[in-house]
Image (spheres, rainbow, N blue to C red):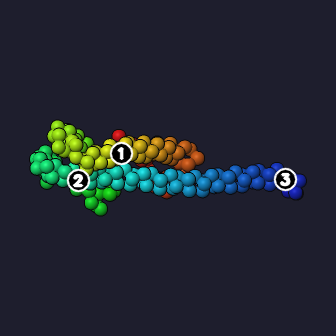
Amino acid sequence: MILNEANLLPLYIVIAIIGVLLFLFLLIEIIGYFSLKKLNDRIEKRNYNVNILLAQKYDILVLLAKVFKKYNMTIPSEFQEELSPKMDESLKRLTLTERLTVKAYLMKASQTLLYFAESNEKVKNDNEYQILKKSLLEIDQNHRKALALYNADALGFNYWIKVWAFRPIARLANFSEREIVS
């Protein structure tokens, strides 16, 4: 069989189709990488926001303790302990376990302080206490919203790194599943 241009035309068509498909696959992978990178960065920012809200809650609780001292009320012992978490720069990036520990502590401390404050008429009617209580409730509400946004993005990210088209680039970029936070 003699190879001429007429016999090679189907081969050229197959090579062209394979080239176009490879180009489209590479284009999808590149777009997928930048989309996953952007989503990963957004999740990091949301995680940081959740940690900042916990730090703000701690700061409000410290101010509540000062209101207690202003009226010579004893601060509950669990709030005075040395083991209580301190929110400083090193704790702005908490792991899931650390966040759960800090969150549990802050929840218990805020409930205890608010209970004692509400049981004392002087503190309950104090203007500073009212402002701090309102701020604490707003921080709790914002914390719940921030967690919902984080979890929504994390669920989306976890889905997209498992999609067959993005799985290769997710593995190459070392993207791993994000934890869902309660």
Residue 142 point in image, percent of width and height: 39, 45
* Nearest to N terminus: mark 1 or mark 2: 2
Q: Is residue 156 above or below residue 18?
A: above
SS assignment at label 2: helix
Q: Give the spatial CA distance, label 2 vs label 3.
A: 81 Å
| Residue furthest to the bottom | 89
Please identify the quadrant where the C terminus is shown. Answer: top left
SS assignment at label 3: helix
Of circles 2 and 3, the one toward us is 2
Q: Give the spatial CA distance, label 1 vs label 2.
A: 15 Å
Q: Which mark is residue 138?
A: 1
Residue type, mark 1 in image: Glu
Taking the spot 75% from the left edge, 51% from the top edge, the residue there is 17
Residue type, mark 3 in image: Leu
Residue behind mark 3: 9
Taking the spot 16% from the left edge, 40% from the top edge, the residue there is 120
Q: Is residue 81 left or right of residue 87?
A: left
* Nearest to N terminus: mark 1 or mark 3: 3
Q: Which mark is residue 63?
A: 2
